[in-house]
Image: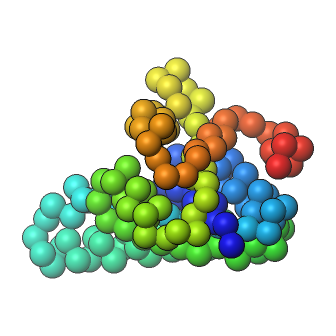
């Protein structure tokens, strides 16, 4: 089964990427894999503190994931899977794509601010020509109705 890999982070545009991935998966018989990457700088503390912070980050991610997962199950009949990795975002995204041969599309949400589409979209777009899967970039300000129409 082809999976849509979507990135769970704290950005506003993440919501539209989640919606798009779930709608496309529902309409094409695919699956959704949600990847959240914990940056390494969050754990530059003493070992005991670092372990507590790592566990808190995982709990926060899991709670955030459950909100999206409930919507995907209830509205799109898609049961997503969660993957949590630690490291630099681009490196871990590429590692996850290589680790799971069922991933067929990377779905990213583009920011709407003047600074550009966001660091992840910018970095992944630079290497788009050599990626093992296509990227779908979903505009962050696209309406739910428009997303439904194009998926």
Where on the picture, by quarter, is residue 2? bottom right
Q: Residue at x 58, y 69 (%)?
A: 102
Q: Is residue 54 left or right of residue 120?
A: left
Q: Residue at x 53, y 73 (%)?
A: 82
Q: Nearer the viewer, residue 63 or 81?
A: 81
Percent of width and height locating residue 81: 59, 75
Q: Is residue 71 visible?
A: no
Percent of width and height locating residue 84: 43, 70
Q: Is residue 71 left or right of residue 57?
A: right
Q: Is residue 94 visible?
A: yes
Q: Is residue 59 above or below residue 111?
A: below
Q: Is residue 115 left or right of residue 31?
A: left
Q: Residue at x 68, y 73 (%)?
A: 1
Q: Is residue 38 above or below residue 12?
A: below
Q: Nearer the viewer, residue 56 or 33?
A: 33
Percent of width and height locating residue 67: 65, 68
> Which scheme is used to colour this image of the protein?
rainbow
The image shows a total of numbered marks equal to 0
Q: Residue at x 42, y 57 (%)?
A: 93
Q: Is residue 39 left or right of residue 79?
A: left
Where on the picture, by quarter, is residue 126? top left
Q: Is residue 95 above or below residue 100?
A: above
Percent of width and height locating residue 56: 36, 73
Task: Return the residue found at the far top.
Answer: 114
Q: Is residue 50 above or below residue 145?
A: below
């Amino acid at each position: 089964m082809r999976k849509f890999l979507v990135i769970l982070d704290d950005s506003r545009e993440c919501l539209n990427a989640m919606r798009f991935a779930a709608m496309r998966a529902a309409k094409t018989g695919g699956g959704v894999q949600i990847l959240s990457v914990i940056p390494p700088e969050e754990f530059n503390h003493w070992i005991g503190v670092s372990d507590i912070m790592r566990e808190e980050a995982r709990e926060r991610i899991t709670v955030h994931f459950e909100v999206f997962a409930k919507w995907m199950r209830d509205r799109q009949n898609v049961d997503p899977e969660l993957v949590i990795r630690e490291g630099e975002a681009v490196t871990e995204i590429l590692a996850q794509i290589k680790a799971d041969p069922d991933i067929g599309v990377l779905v990213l949400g583009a920011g709407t601010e003047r600074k550009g589409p966001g660091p992840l979209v910018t970095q992944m777009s630079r290497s788009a020509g050599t990626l093992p899967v296509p990227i779908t970039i979903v505009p962050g300000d696209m309406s739910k109705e428009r997303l439904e129409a194009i998926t």
